[in-house]
Amino acid sequence: MRTYTYRARNMTGRTVEGTINAADENAVYRQLSEEHLVPIAIHPAAEKKTGLLLARFFPGRVKDEDLIVFSRQLSTMLKAGIPILQSFDILRNQTEKPAFKDVLTKVSHSLTGGSRLSEALAEFPHVFSPEYVNIVISGETGGDLVQALANMAVWMERDLEMKTAIKSALRYPVMVIIALIAAAILMIMFVIPRFALFFAKYTTTLPLPTRILIAVNNIFQNYWAVLLIIIVLAIAAVFFLLRNPKIRLQYDKMKFHLKLIGPIYTKIMISRFARIFSMLVHSGIPALRGMEVAAEVVANTYFKELLLKVKQSIQDGGTIADGFFNDMPIFPPMVTNLIAVGEKTGSLDDMLEQVVDFYDMEIKYTLRNLTAMIEPIITLVIACGVLFLALAVLLPVWNMSQAMTSQMK
């Protein structure tokens, strides 16, 4: 088997390019004809061993942007009447990401073997999330796969926009913290040792800030390897402890109650859940099934546990609103009231969309003010560090000048 590159024309007259593994050029021609492609040029592919090895061992990650483009293009092609197999072949040939190309190739093979699209996509949970697969299932059963894919693309775009806003808001504080840590390391490694050598000549008792400074310098200079081992072990211990379900549950619960981060984290989780649940309900998926999918998607074990309690309450005969009111303490009354209204009027998905719109606006407003909220804390930390360093350096000098003045008198 050899690899061949080809250029062909599809049923719409568009030129497509790609690669095929086949015994010879005639086999390539037959395979292209079976895929309803008219070959224009077929050539043996040049061997690129280094690139193939890199693509094999470092295939890359399929980004949200890739899935959004894929969903929109597949929806458009299906709406235009292009068969799903041909649509996948076109999308596979268009993508430049080796990892995504490989996934689309395998999905196409599954479809050729008789699998449904949802079944083929479910084989790649690291690319197609549970909510994505369930939306496709709703589109298949409801006969409107085109609209289901379009809705999924819109949802992913909004979710990506929110992730980008969060990252942008956190970029400045993270950069400042990294700069502070780097400055502290430079001070300990290069500046403090010089002062420590100077103050070591003192025979009198040094001020407390200076003694602390010298002690810190001695620890870092003589026991830096031990400190490094302790830091690595501490990080490993944290990761190990968080794998314990009980500890992880308490850790995820604590996130909602942190003073500065807790309120915005709660808003993000409510918005994400409402967006997922609204999309699933709007697509015709039953509320209980939608709650199961949302529980799997939400990356917080405490929130997931509360959702499963709400689901159990509904299974026991309660209403959706009562379940959220009794078993979801992190939801504010406004959210539970909107859910109750939506359930009574049969417009639950519309009410959840209102929740999403409200909290998205709240999150953006809070993120815009996050820098202003964090700046005083950063300024205070910097001021305390500068004050401590100034006292540690200047107090001994002041004491020395006082002693020399007293001797002169």
Image (cartoon, rainbow, N blue to C red):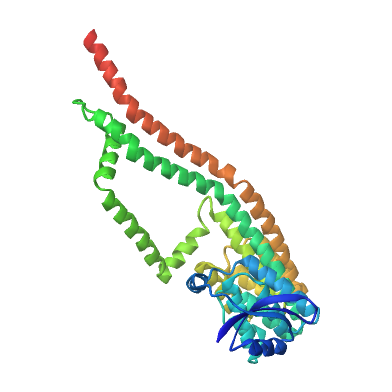
In this view, 110 is above or below 69? below
| Residue situated in front as seen by the camera: 152 or 80 | 80
| Residue situated in front as seen by the camera: 356 or 98 | 98
Q: Quadrant of residue 9?
A: bottom right
Q: Is residue 33 left or right of residue 12?
A: left
In this view, 358 is above or below 24? above
Q: Quadrant of residue 201?
A: top left
In the image, residue 402 lies at what x, y percent? 28, 16
Q: Quadrant of the N terminus?
A: bottom right
Residue at the (50%, 41%) spot, across then down:
377
Residue at the (42%, 44%) spot, across then down:
182
Q: Quadrant of residue 393?
A: top left
Residue 315 in view: no
* Residue farthest toward the left in the current orientation of the protein: 203
In this view, 73 is above or below 386? below
* Residue farthest toward the top in the current orientation of the protein: 409
Q: Is residue 384 left or right of residue 139?
A: left
In the image, residue 228 lies at what x, y percent? 31, 53
Q: Quadrant of the C terminus?
A: top left
Q: Is residue 254 left or right of residue 82?
A: left
In the image, residue 230 lies at what x, y percent? 30, 55
Residue at the (66%, 89%) spot, across then down:
26
In the image, residue 77 lies at what x, y percent? 76, 77
Residue 264 in view: yes
Total numbered circles: 0
Residue at the (69%, 86%) spot, across then down:
32
| Residue situated in front as seen by the camera: 326 or 253 | 253
In this view, 147 is above or below 162? below
